[in-house]
Amino acid sequence: MYEERIILVKSNNFENALKKAKKEAKRYVKYLDGCKLVADFSDTFHLFDDKIRDLTEIYSTMTSSSLSPEKYTEKYYPDELDDCQKHGLKHYWHNKDNKNSACYHCKVIKKGQLWK
């Protein structure tokens, strides 16, 4: 399981914002059992709005690629797994429709209230 986080950092410049973000990433994984920082990567984005409000853009990135749109999304945003258990992972259930349970991380849906 991998997690990407987007946090807001108040700073007077990009360099200080990056330092704060890296420090926070190290603090975050320190308190999570079994977690580790896989990539020491942080990025910054200047907020252009004066106040954070509905629809304020808090992050954006643009990547140049020679891949077709289909290949790009397939590579960087793959579809969810067909079945977590086939990959040695555990299902994490949520209520799909009060009758069925659906896994947050794959396409498996099972009858019953397994989220309870």
Image: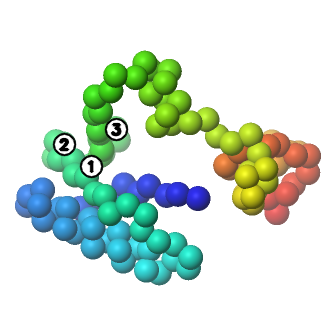
Disc 1 from disc 2: Cα separation: 7 Å
Identity, as a three-letter code, of the amino acid under mark 1: Ile
**Which residue occupies 31% across, 71% down?**
24
Label whose residue precedes the other's in the sequence (2 or 3): 2
Report the residue that reaches farthest toward the right.
Answer: 111
Residue 20, percent from left and from top: 22, 69
Q: Which numbered disc covers residue 55?
A: 3
**Which residue occupies 67% across, 49% down?**
105
Are dots 2 and 3 in contact, CB under 8 Å? Answer: no
Left or right, residue 105 beside residue 16:
right
Residue 46, percent from left and from top: 17, 47
Identity, as a three-letter code, of the amino acid under mark 3: Leu
**Which residue occupies 61% across, 35% down?**
79
Pick whichever, 35 or 56, lies toward us. 35
Q: Which numbered disc covers residue 52?
A: 1
Are dots 1 and 2 in contact, CB under 8 Å? Answer: yes
Disc 3 from disc 1: Cα separation: 8 Å
Identity, as a three-letter code, of the amino acid under mark 2: Asp
Residue 10 in sight in this render: no
Residue 109, percent from left and from top: 82, 43
